[in-house]
Amino acid sequence: MQQRDKDLLTKILKEHGYSTTNARLFVCELLWDKEPQTMHDLVGRLNGAVDRASLYRTIQLFEKLGIVHRIYMGWKYKVELSDVLSHHHHHISCIGCGAITAITDEHHVEHLIRSIASKYDFVPSSHQLEIQGYCKACSLAQK
């Protein structure tokens, strides 16, 4: 995580009346440039730097401020940095093994979303596309 990214996090927190704490910086570092992670994964990576309660409070605050968002897989979820601190992207997620893959062909997806919005005379302010199903390995295992 570069200094400009830390500065942006500090700015967002300050705009909403929160301070930048070591715990908040650490949690942001845990999520930085990483695949979506479960809370269990994050707890496992704390290494005593932050306690579990602080992690959960920080994630809850980050969700409230739009810094992170959840990716649902049935009733389970993973968290990742939102577009505020990361590049905008979409996912496909396997409900069999839990694998989440970022869709790399963003141009076509974004064009489709703009086209749908235009068809309904709608001006979108944000969007999130999640496609759920089974990866090749899980599909073959079900047969």
Image: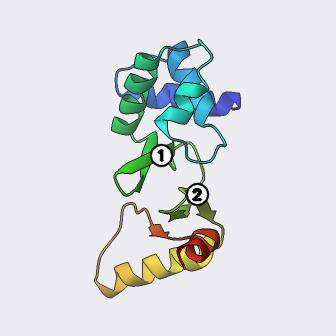
Above or below, comparing residue 21 to residue 13 in the picture? above
Give the residue at mark 1: 78
Front of the two marks 1 and 2: 2
Look at the numbered disc 2 and give the secondary structure of its residue: loop
Residue type at mark 1? Answer: Lys
In this view of the protein, which residue sits in the foreground, 76 or 22?
76
In this view of the protein, which residue sits in the foreground, 23 or 74?
74
**Rendered location of residue 108, percent (x, y):** 58, 80
Q: Badge 1 local density, few (<14 within 10 Å), some, or many (20+)?
A: some
Give the residue at mark 2: 99
* Quadrant where the image shows the C terminus: bottom right
Q: Badge 2 local density, few (<14 within 10 Å), some, or many (20+)?
A: some
Residue type at mark 2? Answer: Ala
Q: Earlier in the sequence, mark 1 or mark 2?
A: 1
On residue 24, the disc is: none
In this view of the protein, which residue sits in the foreground, 26 or 39?
39
Q: Quadrant of residue 62?
A: top left
